[in-house]
Image (cartoon, coloured by chain):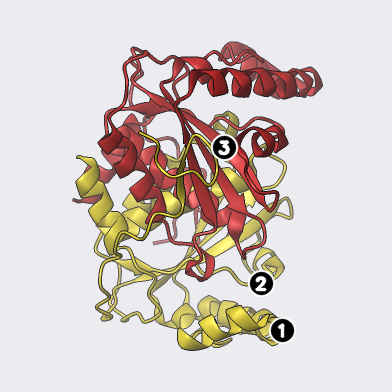
Chain colours: A yellow, B red
């Protein structure tokens, strides 16, 4: 597989907030979590765990608690971000948490070196695997995640980092376009290409 | 591209500490940084920048400062990690920083929401693109990175997160194997598959 093919997956992966109720195969979920385990991690310690949730009642409780913490967040938003959220129709309502057939909660073991960095690499790997399975997701980060420790019996040394709702979607989003390159510098920060 | 092909790239990507001096094409570097820009980020703000360094003198200065901060780190290591480092022959000497034809410094804009998480997703995307280019790298994280702000004119609101040495390697490392699954739980943390 070459980089062009890899980048096609990266371009097609878009954040999605509408899911159909169509179920996901066990094999898909296994490939997705297997991909997450392949992530490189600090001192090869794999400082993360994955909880797959299918139980509808649990999804409802997670949605309820997420909306509770997000109300406070949306009230405290600074103006620029508030506009972006409004344009994207992102509110404190999180229907995708009960719509998606599966929620994947990824937590990092805070006692490990580079736990946060390693956990987010594994989230990136799984986001790509979800796309290559023909499925969609969203890296949803509730402002506070302590309630997940309680609901899902996650030990206190683990910090839940993200809820990935996973499912099929009917949204047809355009693939990402390559974006202007004011992000890439040569030799020094701020310098455009020199060779 | 299906998940099996994607996972082949994930399995082949191994951390490498020996690089040949063979140069890297401009096109490869462009594809790698383009992949990094495709990373999803909090509020789509792309809170990261990439600095590509080819200048040998700068690489030497970066190596010198990295070794300086890492001496202190290695002296303070707790026992378990010390053993792992020793087995892996990881010391405070960082010859790869001057051997690799290119260093890629990735920094996150600390004024942006979810800057750290987004920056590490982009690092994961580039690590995969480096592999799919037939190149190797290492996610090298000096214990302290403030010296990079000084050397590379990186503004103080940016936090350098990683130095990725990029190059060809003569090391022939086995692809990663799928590892035992005590990381994946169903419905609750600690629960093995229930269906």
Q: Which numbered disc, 3 or 2, marks the residue closer to the eye? A: 3
Q: For the residue labelled by badge 3, is the local secondary structure a helix, a strand or a loop?
A: strand
Q: Position of residue B150 (x, y in %)?
A: 69, 36
Q: Pinpoint residue B74: horizontal percent, then vertical percent.
A: 74, 19
* Residue B149 seen in the current view: yes
The CA distance from mark 3 to mark 2 is 26 Å
Residue B35 lies, with reference to residue B134, above or below; the image says: below
Between marks 1 and 3 in the image, the one whose residue lies nearer the viewer: 3
Residue holding disc 3: B162
Residue occupied by mark 2: A143
Label 1 vs 2, first from the N-terminus: 1
- Answer left or right for B42 relative to A156: left
SS label for mark 1 = helix
Depth check, front residue: A14 or B173: A14
Residue in the image at 44% along x and 52% along y = A124
Question: Does label 3 lie on the same chain as label 1?
Answer: no
> Chain ID for label 1?
A
Instruction: Tell me what residue is drawn at x 54 percent, y 88 percent.
Output: A93
How many angstroms separate mark 1 from mark 2 (CA)? 9 Å
Q: Are marks 1 and 2 in contact (CB under 8 Å)?
A: yes
Which numbered dot is residue B153?
none
Q: Chain of mark 2?
A: A
| Disc 3 crowd, CA 10 A, few/some/many (<14, 14-19, 20+) | many
Which quadrant would the C terminus of chain B be assigned to in this image? bottom left
| Rendered view: B72 above or below A55 | above
Q: Position of residue A97 (x, y in %)?
A: 48, 78
**Compared with residue B4, is residue A59 higher up or lower down, i.e. above or below?**
below
Residue topped by disc 1: A72
> How far apart are the two marked residues, 1 and 3, measured between alpha carbons?
34 Å
Classify mark 2: residues with Cα within 10 Å, few (<14), some (14-19) or many (20+).
some
Look at 70% across and 47% down and name the residue there: A110
Kindly indicate whether the residues beneath marks 1 and 2 are on one polypeptide chain. Answer: yes
């Amino acid at each position: 597989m070459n980089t062009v093919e890899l980048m096609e997956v990266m371009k097609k992966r878009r954040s999605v907030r509408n899911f159909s109720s169509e179920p996901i195969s066990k094999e898909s979920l296994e490939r997705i979590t297997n991909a997450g385990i392949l992530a490189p991690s600090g001192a090869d310690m794999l400082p993360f765990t994955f909880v797959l949730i299918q139980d509808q009642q649990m999804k409802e409780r997670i949605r309820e608690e997420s909306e509770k913490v997000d109300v406070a967040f949306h009230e405290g938003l600074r103006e620029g971000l508030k506009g972006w959220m409004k344009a994207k129709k992102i509110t404190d309502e999180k229907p995708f948490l009960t719509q998606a057939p599966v929620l994947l909660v990824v937590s990092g073991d805070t006692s490990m070196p580079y736990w946060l960095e390693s956990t987010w690499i594994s989230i990136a790997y799984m986001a790509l695997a979800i796309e290559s399975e023909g499925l969609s997701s969203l890296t949803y980060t509730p402002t506070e995640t302590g309630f997940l420790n309680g609901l899902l019996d996650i030990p206190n040394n683990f910090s839940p980092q993200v809820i990935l709702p996973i499912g099929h979607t009917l949204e047809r989003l355009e693939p990402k376009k390559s974006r202007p390159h004011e992000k890439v510098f040569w030799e020094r920060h701020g310098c455009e290409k020199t060779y």
